[in-house]
Structure formats: C-alpha cells, structure tokens
C-alpha cells in the first residue's frame, strides 16, 4: 500500500475476515503483526503504523487451510481491512483455489 496524500496517515488497525488468515505490515527492516480476526482467538493487536506522504508498506497475508480441517480446500475469499485513525477503511481481498 502507498500513502498517496501529502499528509501522514496513521494506520490504527488491521483485521482479517477469518481466523485462518493473518496479516503483517512490512517495510525495510521492520515487520509488525500478526494481525487477525477479532473475537475468535486470533492474534489481534493495534497497528499504530505511521505512513508518511508517499511512503509504502507491504501487507503480507498468510492463509492456513489447516485451520478449517478437511473443509479447507476449494475456493477461498478472504478480506483484510486496514483502518486509519480517522475511520477510513481500505479493504484488501484475497481469492484463491486451494487444492489438496
């Protein structure tokens, strides 16, 4: 993700749509997370990531099909919501076909 504005943006939280999915914020020499689904035992932490104007961060997403047992195969559609301190939300979507 890249901050296209001329102001600093504070990324306050990162949450995923399922406990089988976690996300990390990465930049050169830094990694924060894991961030997961709230309320289901997944790792949930505040992001508190400041992104200056024009700066970028990588969002690495990890899907664990074993979290669903034998039902963890087939089409997968997961979401990662990046919420800014001012309430703005950017939604990332991951689609895949998981085969055994």
Image (spheres, grey):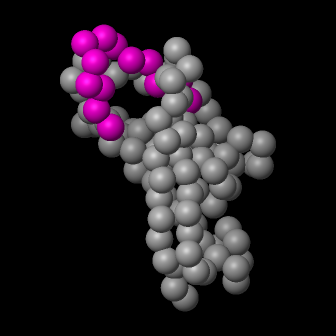
Q: Quadrant of the C terminus?
A: bottom right
Name the quadrant containing residue 31.
top left
How many numbered discs sit on the rendered protein?
A: 0
Residue 52 location (% of width, % of height) = 29, 18
Name the quadrant containing residue 2.
top left
Residue 99 location (% of width, % of height) = 51, 85
Going by the image, does 7 lie left or right of 48?
A: left
95 to 84, vertically: above or below: below
Instruction: Name the one closer to the observer, 67 or 71.
Output: 71
Find the residue positioned furthest to the bottom.
100
The residue stretch that appears in magenta: 1-13
Q: What predominant SS class does the magenta segment belong to? A: loop
Residue 35 location (% of width, % of height) = 57, 42
Point 61% across, 33% down: residue: 45
Residue 96 location (% of width, % of height) = 47, 71
Name the quadrant containing residue 1.
top left
Point 70% across, 83% down: residue: 70
* Residue 48 counted in the magenta span: no
Find the residue positioned furthest to the top.
7
Going by the image, does 26 lie left or right of 24?
A: left
Point 60% across, 80% down: residue: 73
Point 39% across, 17% down: residue: 9
Q: Is residue 33 visible?
A: no
Q: Is residue 65 visible?
A: yes
Instruction: Name the one closer to the observer, 44 or 72.
Output: 72
Going by the image, does 15 lie left or right of 90?
A: right
39 to 75, vertically: above or below: above
């Amino acid at each position: 993700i890249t901050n296209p504005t001329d102001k600093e943006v504070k990324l306050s939280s990162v949450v995923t749509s399922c406990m089988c999915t976690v996300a990390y914020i990465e930049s050169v020499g830094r990694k924060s997370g894991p961030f997961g689904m709230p309320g289901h035992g997944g790792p949930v932490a505040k992001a508190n990531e400041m992104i200056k104007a024009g700066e970028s961060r990588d969002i690495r997403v990890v899907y664990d099909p074993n979290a669903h047992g034998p039902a963890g195969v087939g089409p997968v559609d997961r979401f990662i919501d990046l919420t800014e301190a001012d309430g703005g939300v950017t939604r990332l979507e991951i689609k895949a076909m998981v085969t055994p």
